Image (cartoon, helix red, strand yellow):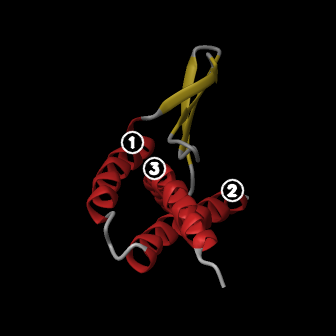
Amino acid sequence: MGFILIVPLLLLSGWIIYSTWKLNTQFFSGQYTRTLMKLLVVGAIVGVLFTVAVKYSFTAALQFYGFPVPVAFLRTELGKTTMTELSPLLKCAATAANFLSGLALALLPLKVILTLKQFKAESRVEP
């Protein structure tokens, strides 16, 4: 059941990271490599935070650990607190999805800018 959310998130994040790298190297001859590397460092920090440090709750009785895919749930019922974690395979996939989504989130502005610059350059070319 968890793979319904995890697999598309992994694919989308991977596509954003790969296509940003490809835009930089193919169409712009690596002139944005320094910016890309800085954003990758920021994205790695955000990815680690998404994986390790993010904790949020919808109610006082239910807390989630990890973002955007929760890897653990903390429930409080009648004064008793229980921690429920995902199975090891799902937890590993969710952790990877959380980390890659942090990387992709940091690279998304650069991807949008490079894509717009590419389209602008292509529209200037007259046949």
Q: CA distance from mark 3 to mark 2?
A: 16 Å
Q: Amino acid at mark 3?
A: Gly
Residue on which disc 2 sits: 5
Q: Earlier in the sequence, mark 3 or mark 2?
A: 2
Q: Position of residue 83 (x, y in %)?
A: 53, 35
Residue on which disc 3 sits: 102
Question: Residue sitting at 53 percent across and 46 percent down?
Answer: 71
Q: Earlier in the sequence, mark 1 or mark 2?
A: 2
- Pick the residue in front: 29 or 2: 29
Residue on which disc 1 sits: 52
Inspect this view and state whether residue 89 appears: no
Camera-side mark, 3 or 1: 3
- Pick the residue in front: 34 or 91: 34
Q: Position of residue 22 (x, y in %)?
A: 45, 75
Q: Amino acid at mark 2?
A: Leu
Up-down relation of residue 62 to residue 46 (above or below) = above
Up-down relation of residue 85 to residue 24 (above or below) = above
Up-down relation of residue 97 to residue 26 (above or below) = above
Residue 109 is labelled as none
Q: Position of residue 45 (x, y in %)?
A: 32, 46
Q: Could you classify mark 2 by the number of other residues whose Cα lies within 10 Å: few (under 14), some (14-19), or many (20 or more)?
A: few
Camera-side mark, 3 or 2: 3
Q: Is residue 74 left or right of residue 95?
A: right
Q: CA distance from mark 3 to mark 1?
A: 12 Å
Question: Residue sitting at 61 percent across and 63 percent down?
Answer: 12
Label 1 SS: helix
Label 3 SS: helix
Q: Is residue 100 left or right of residue 122?
A: left
- Pick the residue in front: 79 or 5: 5
Q: Could you classify mark 3 by the number of other residues whose Cα lies within 10 Å: few (under 14), some (14-19), or many (20 or more)?
A: many
